Image (spheres, rainbow, N blue to C red):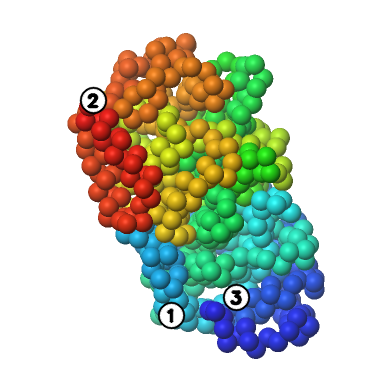
Amino acid sequence: MIFGKLQRSVTGAAKTLRVWQVHRVRNITAYTGTSLTELPPNAAAFIKNSEEMCQPDKVHICDGSNVENRWLTEKLVAQGTLSPLKKYENCWLARTNPSDVARVESKTFICTENKDEAVVGSLGNWISPENMKTAINQRFPSCMKGRTMYVIPFSMGPVGSPLSKVGIEITDSPYVVESMRIMTRIGIDVVHQLQKNAEFVKCLHSVGRPENGIVEFPAWPCDPARTIILHKPDENFIASYGSGYGGNSLLGKKCFALRIGSTIAKREGWLAEHMLILGITNPQGEKIYVAAAFPSACGKTNLAMMTPTLPGYKIECVGDDIAWMRFDENGQLRAINPEYGFFGVAPGTSKETNPIAMQTIFKNTIFTNVASTSDGGVYWEGLEKEHSADVAITDWLGKPWTKGSSKTPAAHANSRFCTPATQCPIIDPAWEDPRGVPISAILFGGRRPKGIPLVYEARSWAHGVFIGASMRSESTAAAEHTKKVIMHDPFAMRPFFGYNFGKYLEHWLSMENRGKVPKIFHVNWFLKNKDGKFMWPGFGENSRVLDWVFRRVKGENCAKDSAIGFVPSEGALRTDGLDNLPESLDKLFDLPKDFWLQEVSEIEKYFETEIGNHLPNAVTKELTYLKERISKM
Ligand code: OXD
Ligand code: MN
């Protein structure tokens, strides 16, 4: 027990509550939040223990109200963290310390008794319980001195849904509170839920304080040198120190919904995945839901909000980043989006690439590390056409920036918009259905400039699991990787596994025995020709691939076998109205033998070094089968 000593000092529910109430009356001066006197004792103890360790000046328990929202925004403006974007309704710009701009995978740890339970190879970092305790003790004591400690009760998923889970995030960053308000359901309804079921994930966050006491950017305090993100699955506990940005600090997202979420899902027999969820309606009015896993910054938000070019098709968005999926009593796999907002990558988002996002993000949104304009707006790479020459641009670092002549990007490559999902004009009518939406197909994909065809279908569930395990993709700016290299990113979960990847594969394989499993596909929008040009137009034209997926789900005979799986049969992929492909369609389905021999050998090596003897037999068999098929190509 990380909080062992403090926990023991709180004896019994009554005392815990009394101590806590007195404390609130003593400390809250500026704004009193809600009087959450009925918090269950375990929640009150978590708050109390965190307070004793972090020594904040004040404690504020968030009620999620509009008054609270205004109060916090004013505070953030006064301290220079947010500035208003006058061009839009209730939109704000934040600039971080330039050393705090992305997820820090190298400083993210899973804590278990035995290393093998958590990670193998390079799939994440392991820390022992002892060392986790030390890491906490070296950083958290007194880290909130002079600050307010905010307590955010939040729900991942619709409040009260049997698929949802509750968390309590404690943070000293009002920016985090404001972002959590957008990204999760927070406040009083969640407290009522906690009264019914006192189970919650403990999320402790501090932006920290550098050891030398010098806060370089007072508007964005952080401690990059000592940043650490710790997860203890057996206690449902997360402790994040030193960073205020994105997945490092909005603990509901990657830390809870994926890392801790995947361990809860394993225990309870469901799946917590890095997947968007979309609904697609065909011209006949039939609808299916699809979940899709792509690594960070590979177009999940664009696909989830796609405007189809194929006439008669409609896409509706359930979520753009995370899916929690479980079989219902009829054996149907159902999914919820545990989030309440979109934390999307800004650069590249435009009227051409994602018109729906552009209709979503210009109210009630926090933009972080984008460039700003002299008329009170925002700017980033991709908005060139929408920017008029008489409007001056200031880059994400606050320096003047000129289109055409400045050498550095105006917006940071991982700059983001944080915007409420309810504002999305194509949000799915069932997106908050507590039962979740039925999933008929799962797509895996990545950025692969060579060799991987536009789309192929797995032959079986086990083959699909193998495809997920072998996913690779070009690195992006979402994390601290600097070079553009092809990285293994199994299930798009490489940075987000909460437990041993071999066991994760076993868990996925076991789904087949629990209910009706969906069809699995692999897609690649990013093939390039020898001139470096994209061979597929992507975006709305991806509806052609979804059309084929839809027809396959409906059982249409429109596929043929290939060495790697089923691909569209002759003429089955609709290309009507698509006359500007830089190469013939066949090229999008090329399977170069030398490429695939190399690919399989990479996968084999990866499985050996990263999974070793945890590799399930069913996956080994799929690898052997693929090798045989390729050698005969
Ligand atoms: C994200 C990510 O922020 O995957 O969604 O990095
Ligand atoms: Mn993501």
Is residue 248 shown above or below 441?
A: below
> Badge 3 local density, few (<14 within 10 Å), some, or many (20+)?
some
Mark earlier in primary sequence (2, 1): 1
Is residue 557 shown above or below 428?
A: above
Image quarter of the N terminus: bottom right
Question: In 3D space, how far apart are the residues under numbered discs 2 and 1 (Cα atoms)?
Answer: 53 Å
Mark earlier in primary sequence (3, 1): 1
Quadrant in the picture for residue 468: top left
Amino acid carrying label 2: it is Met
Q: Nearer the viewer, mark 2 or mark 1?
A: 2
Q: Is residue 170 visible?
A: yes
Mark earlier in primary sequence (3, 2): 3
Q: Which residue is mark 1?
A: 130
Residue 580 location (% of width, % of height): 39, 15
Quadrant in the picture for residue 491: top left
Q: Is residue 63 visible?
A: no
**Horizontal placement of 421 versus 508: left or right?**
right
**Horizontal placement of 52 versus 512: left or right?**
right
Q: Which residue is mark 2?
A: 633
For the residues labelled 3 and 1, say whether their Cβ atoms are less than 8 Å apart: no
Q: Residue at x 75, y 60 (%)?
A: 193
Question: In 3D space, how far apart are the residues under numbered discs 3 and 2 (Cα atoms)?
Answer: 65 Å
Amino acid carrying label 1: it is Glu
Q: Which residue is mark 3?
A: 147
> Badge 2 local density, few (<14 within 10 Å), some, or many (20+)?
few
Amino acid carrying label 3: it is Arg
Image quarter of the C terminus: top left
- Give the camera-side residue of 410 and 612: 612
Q: Secondary structure at mark 2?
A: loop
